[in-house]
Image (cartoon, rainbow, N blue to C red):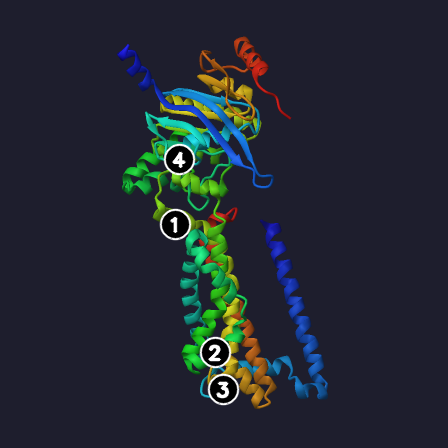
Amino acid sequence: MQMEQTRKIEKNIITLEHVDKEFEKVKEGGVFEVVKDLNIKVRENEFLVLFGPGQCGKTTILNMIAGFEEPTAGTIRMKGEKINGPDPSRGMVFQNLAIFPWLTVMGNVEYGLRMKGVDKKTRREKAQYYIDLVGLKGFENHYPIQISGGMKQRVGIARAYCNEPDVILMDEPFGALDAQTRYLMQDEIIRIWEAEKRTVIFVTNNIEEAVYVADRIIVIRNCPTNVKAEYEINLPRPRSYIDPDFLKLRREINNVVDHTL
Amino acid sequence: MLERKAKMWQKIAAAAVSFALLILIWQLAAMNPQFSQVMPGPFAVLQKFFVSFVEPIGKNVMLQHMLITLSRWAAGFIAATILGIALGLTMGWYRGFEAFMRPLFELVRPIPTLAWIPLVILWCGIGELAKYVLVFIGAFMSIVQNAYHGAKSVDRTIVNAARMLGCNDRQMFFTIVIPASVPAISAGLQIGVASAWSSVVAAELVRSSSGVGWIVVTGQQNNNMTQILVGILVIAVIGLLLALLIRRVEDVLCRWNKRGR
């Protein structure tokens, strides 16, 4: 019993318990409930997808896990400790990129290590490893404005990984990419995740993307947000969009999700 | 490439035509004896301009006048740049300092440089210091204002990205706020250059014994129309060169902000 307990605690890297989040309505007054009684347990090294309709508060959940925002009620813990502000142990890949336009690809990827005071040679080596991993070899000295949207998102991914966080939060990272690039990046993100086992929490509103990349999908209810359903995705990788099992799961999840206009 | 070159030559040709037309009309007008009394022709002005490099106007030859005015400009402008950027960024980034400083700054900002002249002369006398101070005032306001807006409008997700990568408050100011504000600062410097240049000329018009503003004002006192025009020509050309110089500096500082560089 005791043993069982310990093992379980180790397995969950992040836990959200009865988390509420309200925003003040500036014009009308009163509050807007975005998240209501949200409970999620994130397992170590899993690829967890939070899937739900647009505007349902997924980004708010990620921002709270990242520490950019505080829950109104409830607690979020990482490895048993309450999350208190952003921390390098939780990296984030942002929907709108948020890469530093005045730094080169190399400058962006090594930024976290530079802030930590890692010496130039070490951090260059490490950054180079991640630049190669995401497939940006040869673009080290390019500025973000000189590369494509897909490449910029790779910079964001390499930057998050290079800081060696335990958990990487991805907020609809491929939302702004064209369909072809998006398919490519889905394969890439799985390849990188398999090469560098870390916990990933991936937010998307795209059902195929969710089933394609996830170990586990948590379907999020529309506002106020909480868990509506949960699916273990045991399909072997690499997956196929037209595999019958894939389509069956896709249909099943589609029937569960709240559809909004 | 060839097409771009052809377009460039078209532009140069168009500009040359407008200059040629101005000179032609001016010359035709000056050939009328009544008009030439008050307005010497373009060639008389150009001749006087070149001669003034050898034959002194007052105590100095033209190059000395130019350097005297430029050094006054530089002293005030450099001081305004350093202090203006520091004040603007600090005011834009730190809320408490903004609340303390901004109302005062907003009160002082609309005062035209010319209105400061009597006060500055009474405080600093009619020597060099008064001119430095006036140039400083001329450039300072727009440099502060633009740096302030630069720091104020740093992208929120960029700030979050930096925090997530582990940067502390000091690093945030130096590695995020400053570079993110560079385009806004450059815009401030562009305006600052022009207003500093007008201020130095204004200061020399009011009280001086050398410099290009002095050339204009003694031309008026001696009823020497050619000298006035030479002075104005020099003011225009140096003003233009200074603007080009600052634009060059901007190109270097903001190369990450311009496509294809």
Residue A130 position (above or below residue A43): below
Q: Residues within 10 Å of mark 3 (few under 14, many from 20)?
A: some
Q: Is residue B21 left or right of residue B115?
A: right
Residue highlighted by disc 4: A159
Q: Nearer the viewer, residue B87 or A28?
A: A28
CA distance for labels 1 and 3: 50 Å
Using the image as rendered, state which of residue A30 and residue A70 is in the foreground. A30
Is A27 situated left or right of A157 in this image? right
In the displayed orientation, state which residue is furthest to the front. A30
Quarter assignment of residue A56: top right
What residue would you read off at disc 3?
Answer: B57
Q: Position of residue B182 (x, y in %)?
A: 46, 53
Name the kind of residue labelled 1 in the image.
Answer: Phe
10 Å crowding of disc 2: few (<14), some (14-19), many (20+): few
**SS for callout 1:** helix
Lower sequence index among marks 1 and 3: 3
Q: Secondary structure at mark 3?
A: loop
The foreground one among B246 and B15 is B246
Chain under numbered label 1: B
Q: Position of residue B136 (x, y in %)?
A: 45, 70
